């Protein structure tokens, strides 16, 4: 995994439907074998043009004392698109998914950054979300993802 510069972490951000207008982008990509519907606001598409390096939206399903959905945005300086396994969303924008857990569950660590490890998931497609929404607002990347209500 490329450990480029962390741009920001989006946890629990809401992206209202009104942000997605005529110039936003909608499509579908395959992440770890599962199709994921993606909506990208016009502001996010425009922000990509100003980036020096590609941006990775890394969807994390974070297991600790609690379960948390978060999207970690980082740059991809000097990466090789062919060998990463990242899903290309748009030129300069990639997405990936991983389920992670902390080594220990301590409530005191909730606001901090305890070390995490990738969970060895046998059928990762069961954990990969069904949809992803990306936005860029007030100089920050925002991401939200979720699952269909039915299985």
Image (cartoon, grey):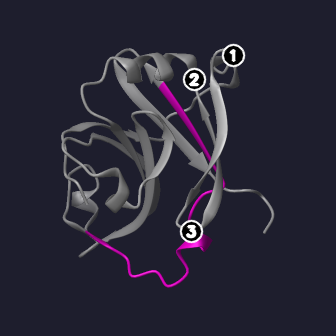
Q: Residue at x 39, y 34 (%)?
A: 92
User: Is residue 87 covered in magenta?
Assistant: no
Q: Which residue is mark 2?
A: 41
* Residue 44 percent location from the top left of the image: 48, 23
* Residue 144 percent location from the top left of the image: 54, 41
- Residue 68 visible somewhere in the drawing: yes
Q: Which of the two discs, 3 and 1, sits closer to the camera?
A: 1
> Distance between the Cα atoms at labels 3 and 1?
29 Å
**Left or right, residue 119 beside residue 102:** right
Q: Secondary structure at mark 1?
A: loop
Bounds of the magenta segment: 117-135
Contact? badges 2 and 1 (CB < 8 Å)? yes
Residue 142 found in image quarter: top left
* Residue 96 percent location from the top left of the image: 44, 55
Q: Residues within 10 Å of mark 2 (few under 14, many from 20)?
A: many
- Residue 61 visible somewhere in the drawing: no
Residue situated furthest bottom in the rendering: 122
**Left or right, residue 59 beside residue 103:** right
Q: Which residue is mark 3?
A: 127
Q: How many numbered marks appear?
A: 3
Q: Secondary structure at mark 2?
A: loop
Dot placed on the residue nearer the N-terminal end, 2 or 1: 1
**Left or right, residue 151 beside residue 40:** right
């Amino acid at each position: 995994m490329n450990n480029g510069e962390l741009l920001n972490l989006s946890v629990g951000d809401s992206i209202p439907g009104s942000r997605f207008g005529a110039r936003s982008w909608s499509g579908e990509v395959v992440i770890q074998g599962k199709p994921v519907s993606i909506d990208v606001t016009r502001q996010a598409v425009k922000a990509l043009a100003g980036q020096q390096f590609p941006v990775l939206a890394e969807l994390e399903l974070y297991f600790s004392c609690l379960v948390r959905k978060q999207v970690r945005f980082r740059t991809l300086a000097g990466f090789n698109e062919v060998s990463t396994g990242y899903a290309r969303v748009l030129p300069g924008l990639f997405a990936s998914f991983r389920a992670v857990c902390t080594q220990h569950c301590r409530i005191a660590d909730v606001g901090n950054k305890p070390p995490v490890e990738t969970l060895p998931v046998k059928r990762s497609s069961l954990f990969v979300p069904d949809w992803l929404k990306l936005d860029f607002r007030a100089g920050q990347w925002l991401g939200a993802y979720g699952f269909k209500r039915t299985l």
